[in-house]
Amino acid sequence: MKTKQFRLLLLLSAFALLILAACGTDSGKEKESADKDDASGDVASTEKPKFLSLLTGGTQGTYYALGGTFAELISTETGVTTTAEVSQASAANMTALQDDKGEIAFVQTDIAYYATEGTMMFDGKKIDAISALGALYPETVQLITTEATGIKTYADLKGKKVSVGAPGSGTYANAEQLLEIHGLTMKDIKPQNLDFGESTDGLQAGQIDAAFITAGTPTAAVEALNATTKVNVIGMDAGKADELIAKYSYYAKDTVKAGTYGLANDVETVSVQAMLAVRKDLSEEVVYNMTKSIYDNTGKISHPKGQLIKAETGLDGISIEIHPGAQKYFDEKK
């Protein structure tokens, strides 16, 4: 009897050991599977994209002119096919990056700040998907008119048809703030929401009287206008640039030099900084290589603004988070 009980106990023990072993094996498989999932997640986060969209601006602006060169440099130096896309520029570009409709974009430093803070045109629509790649060159706020209009000062804009860019655009914000510092509002003028090309076409046809254009000088659209119509650039009133900068610190004093658009004298105005923004979810390696492909090859940029794009000033004026890949590049240049 005792022998039978002993055998039964051994059988039960063996059966229990088999069950434990099976559980151990299943647990090991689950752990292995989990490890594989973790590993695949790491690969996905550092995966090299096949294509990149570079959002620029209108076809007659500086963003578009530079965008084609940047896209070619990134494609050649990184092996990632990059295409420059026409867009509505700064503000629209921030929304497009947020909506994953592009990976890299031109933007003014002031607009990038508004976007990440959820202020101005981004009130209630904070953009949290972007970080900075680097600063490029000054974006000059130009108030363009023609000799035929007789406009010589900001005060002369009262009651006139003035292009101020699309509502919510960087140009619109600049126009609103420069008018404000001169004691004017949008209600004092007849605002026209036109892009750069439409603005210069309207000036040439006499359909508008003046236009705000925020872009690197010389701006292609204004040069084209000056080829057929005498262009004037209206300077800010004395002391107004200092007042503007005191209120909005992202502005800096700037000058449209004599000779630009055939001007006889320097014209004093202000500028913001042009920069490139990228989606945060791009890997450090990809953004590092993009940054390097641009700032290490500025000598290949034929546009006049290429002379102002330098690694040593790549972080100037930027008030949003720098992408780790770009930060790595600029740290190496110190």
Image: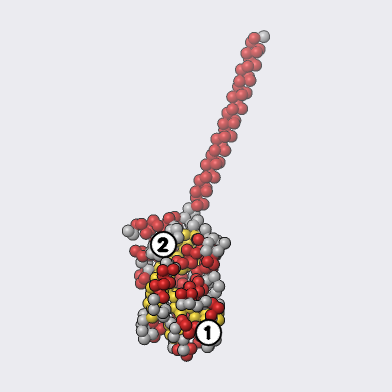
Furthest residue in direction left, as rendered: 334
Quarter of image, res 124: bottom right
Tell which of 58 and 82 is nearer to you: 58
Q: Residue at x 37, y 59 (%)?
A: 330
| Rendered location of residue 138, percent (x, y) | 40, 71
Three-letter amino acid code at the position of disc 2: Thr
Tell which of 186 and 16 is nearer to you: 186
Tell which of 273 and 89 is nearer to you: 273
Q: Residue at x 61, y 20 (%)?
A: 13
Q: Is residue 299 above or below residue 148?
A: above
Q: Residue at x 38, y 80 (%)?
A: 267
Q: Which element carries disc 2, helix, strand or loop?
A: helix
Three-letter amino acid code at the position of disc 1: Lys
For the residues carrying marks 1 and 2, which lies nearer the camera in this image? 1
Q: Residues within 10 Å of mark 2 (few under 14, many from 20)?
A: many
Determine whether, in the image, residue 139 is placed left or right of residue 159.
left
Which of the image's four quarters has the N terminus? Answer: top right
| Rendered location of residue 15, percent (x, y) | 62, 23
Furthest residue in direction front, as rendered: 183
Q: Is residue 332 above or below residue 145?
A: above
Quarter of image, res 312: bottom left
Q: Can you tell which mark lies on residue 160?
A: 1
Q: Which element carries disc 1, helix, strand or loop?
A: loop
Real-space Cα distance between discs 1 and 2? 43 Å
Q: Which residue is mark 2?
A: 291
Q: Residues within 10 Å of mark 1 (few under 14, many from 20)?
A: some
Number of numbered tags placed on the structure image: 2
| Rendered location of residue 128, percent (x, y) | 52, 58
Furthest residue in direction right, as rendered: 1
- Residue 309 visible from this viewpoint: yes
- Residue 225 visible from this viewpoint: no
